[in-house]
Amino acid sequence: QLTLVESGGGLVQPGGSLRLSCAASSDVYAIGWFRQAPGKEREGVSCIRDNGQNLYYLSSVEGRFTISRDKNTAYLDMNNLKPEDTAVYYCAAGRTVCSPYVFTYDYWGQGTQVTVSS
C-alpha cells in the first residue's frame, strides 16, 4: 500500500512563501497537488511526472507556484501567497496519468493546512 506524507503547511502573511513536501513510500508515476478551501470543491493545483515533466498549473497560481520532484518526493514552492490561497493542500499519487482531476488519482495524503492572513 502506497502512502504519502505531506509537510510544510502553516500560517503566513500575504506576500509570503511556503514550501510543501510530499514523500511517497514507493515509486509513483505522477504526483499531483490539490487544494480544498472551506465550502469549495477540491481543485487541482499542479502535477509532475516521474521524469520531472510538469503538465499544468492552476491558472490562479501560475507564476507564483513551482512544482518539482526528487525521486519520489514532490515539492510545491508557493511564493507571493494570497489570502485566496488559504486551503488544505493534498498531494496524490497517480499510476497512469498526471491530471487535474481528482478521480484519476489512487492514493492521497492526509492534507496540510495553509493559511494566508495578516
Image (cartoon, rainbow, N blue to C red):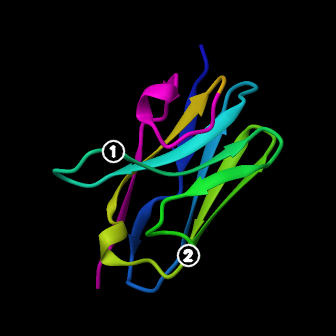
Which residue is at 60% across, 28% downward? Answer: 94
Out of 116 and 34, give the one closest to the viewer.
34
Which sits earlier in the primary sequence, circle 2 or circle 1?
A: 1
Please determine whether, in this image, residue 86 is positioned above or below residue 43: below
Magenta residues, start to end: 97-118
Mark 1 is surrounded, within 10 Å at the Cα level, by few (under 14), some (14 to 19) or many (20 or more) other residues, namely: some
**Height in image: 18 above or below 106?**
below
Quarter in which the N terminus is drawn: top right
Name the kind of residue labelled 1 in the image: Arg
- The answer for how far apart the CA atoms under marks 2 and 1 are is 19 Å
Which kind of residue does numbered mark 2 sit on? Arg
Judged from the image, the secondary structure of the residue bearing numbered disc 1 is loop
**Is residue 86 left or right of 71 when viewed as pictured?**
left
Q: Is residue 102 magenta?
A: yes
Of the pair 18 and 57, the residue shown nearer to us:
57
Is residue 113 shown left or right of residue 9? Answer: left
Residue 46 within the segment the image draws in magenta: no
Q: Quadrant of residue 101?
A: top left
Query: Is residue 99 left or right of 23 when viewed as pictured?
Result: left
Marks 2 and 1 in Cβ contact (< 8 Å): no
Q: Quadrant of residue 103?
A: top left
- Give coordinates of residue 47: x percent, y percent: 61, 47
Residue 69 in picture, x, y percent from top left: 75, 50
Q: Quadrant of residue 93?
A: top right
Give the position of the C terminus as an image quadrant. bottom left
Circle 2 sits on which residue?
64
Give the residue pinned by disc 1.
42
Q: Nearer the viewer, residue 55 or 50?
A: 55
